[in-house]
Image (spheres, coloured by chain):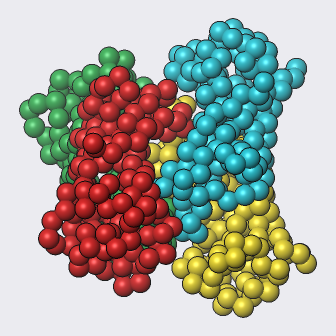
Chain colours: A cyan, B red, C yellow, D green
Amino acid sequence: MTFSTRIAVRGYELDTQGHLHGAIYQDYGEHARWEILREAGAPQEKLLASGVGPVMLEINIRYLAELGAGDEVDVTCEFTWGAGKTFRIDQQIVRADGVLAAEMRVISGLMDLALRKLVANPAEKFAEIVENPSVLGL
Amino acid sequence: MTFSTRIAVRGYELDTQGHLHGAIYQDYGEHARWEILREAGAPQEKLLASGVGPVMLEINIRYLAELGAGDEVDVTCEFTWGAGKTFRIDQQIVRADGVLAAEMRVISGLMDLALRKLVANPAEKFAEIVENPSVLGL
Amino acid sequence: MTFSTRIAVRGYELDTQGHLHGAIYQDYGEHARWEILREAGAPQEKLLASGVGPVMLEINIRYLAELGAGDEVDVTCEFTWGAGKTFRIDQQIVRADGVLAAEMRVISGLMDLALRKLVANPAEKFAEIVENPSVLGL
Amino acid sequence: MTFSTRIAVRGYELDTQGHLHGAIYQDYGEHARWEILREAGAPQEKLLASGVGPVMLEINIRYLAELGAGDEVDVTCEFTWGAGKTFRIDQQIVRADGVLAAEMRVISGLMDLALRKLVANPAEKFAEIVENPSVLGL
């Protein structure tokens, strides 16, 4: 089952045009990514303490519907792992009434916070740190 | 009963020191103020359509406890009305385990969005617009 | 000559990993888009008063270098117009020392703020509103 | 001479009412505080590496004028040191045309990032870390 977290749009997140500010969609995706890591047993502080942190290399967002104050959305998160330094995360932002508000695809890596370089095998490193690798599809 | 709304701290709201960024406490307070207005029957878009908007004239925040990723808080909101152009809102941010994380006091007014001036009697104006004035203590 | 605006990274924009928060790169791009519109003679308030606002339909960001407190960047902005409802904006974030920190491509439209629908011919509509269409490549 | 840093309001910082979002005034103050620390020779990353970080205990902001897209402001910063664990920072946000847009007063401390407790003598600790204590009035 795809991981998902519920978010309520907050009034101060709207812009001059009366709808959710574009970059906040990206933040909603990031929130869901931190939440799936927590669910897997690797909350942010544990990752930082392990000396690594997830970083975005590329993001693509397709905006499909406006969101306004009072809306609630579910943000999904699905990892695809490969052999190299990067992995892919596919996410959807779905309004509570079922309307797909945005889709995003993130190409990510795991950065060594001391060296400021990507670790060679992020899947292996995550598997070491988390408690429930299956949550991440590992 | 004091109005209150539940908020989950989001991972991207933390700063370099690993705790909730200071200005976000202020945003949490603003979120609760929009929510109490919605509860009273005056959501943001209705207020804007009425040509008025609440503005802060002064805010005082006392920071009492750090908040981190995974924390949930209840944010309260209590209005005190007077005779003049301003009114006061007292708010608390209480962690789900009962710890008081912050207290804030806002002196606010209701701005005429065309004239960019405070309306003379905000309590009266709110009473006209909202459906359940008692939610706001009116 | 490509339009460009200078931005100084602000200390509160860094995240728990000590570098510029990912979604802020997107905001830097948006700032440059508002600035080029101002340069063309269509500041945000004039656009809103005209009943239209630019909206993102899709964004792609490639993150190429970390940014930290004290860094200054130049954010460029280049429009490509077509025949339909959408237009493309290509942007670069270049650190003052010449390092390319990010590239983004935005597919955008111009929304009728009352109808909440894209206008049929954004290039034409912009040409009506702005004073110096050549700044936007029109 | 009072320390001051210049900030340009960014288009994405405006809210549904078309003016600078309230909590961003607080961020502008924080930016100036990081900048005066950099000027004194203690940029954020050096402080973090020293195992300490400035934290707010209380903030008071008086909002005196709206700010809009295109405005530039100077944000000042003046420290007052005492004998205890806390110190005071007085700040003004002054629009380029001389209009005072906001005043804020911050009661701050210096937190030991490992112990999550305030250090006993922040003035002494700052004097050890910075290169030009006089910038901070030390």
Q: Left or right? Give the position of A27 relative to C64.
A: left
Q: Left or right? Give the position of D99 relative to A133.
A: left
Q: Residue at x 60, y 46 (%)?
A: A72
Residue B12 visible at all: yes
**Residue D43 image offset from top left, x and y in percent:** 40, 39
**Residue B80 image offset from top left, x and y in percent:** 19, 57
Between D22 and C40, which is closer to the camera in this rendering? D22
Between A98 and D4, which is closer to the camera in this rendering? A98
**Residue C62 image offset from top left, x and y in percent:** 76, 46
Q: What is the total number of numbered labels drawn onto the structure image?
A: 0
Q: Residue at x 14, y 71 (%)?
A: B83
Residue D56 versus residue C75 in the image, above or below? above
Residue B107 visible at all: no
Quarter in which the N terminus of chain C is drawn? bottom right
Q: Residue at x 67, y 88 (%)?
A: C129
Q: Residue at x 25, y 56 (%)?
A: B137
Q: Left or right? Give the position of D100 relative to D9.
A: left
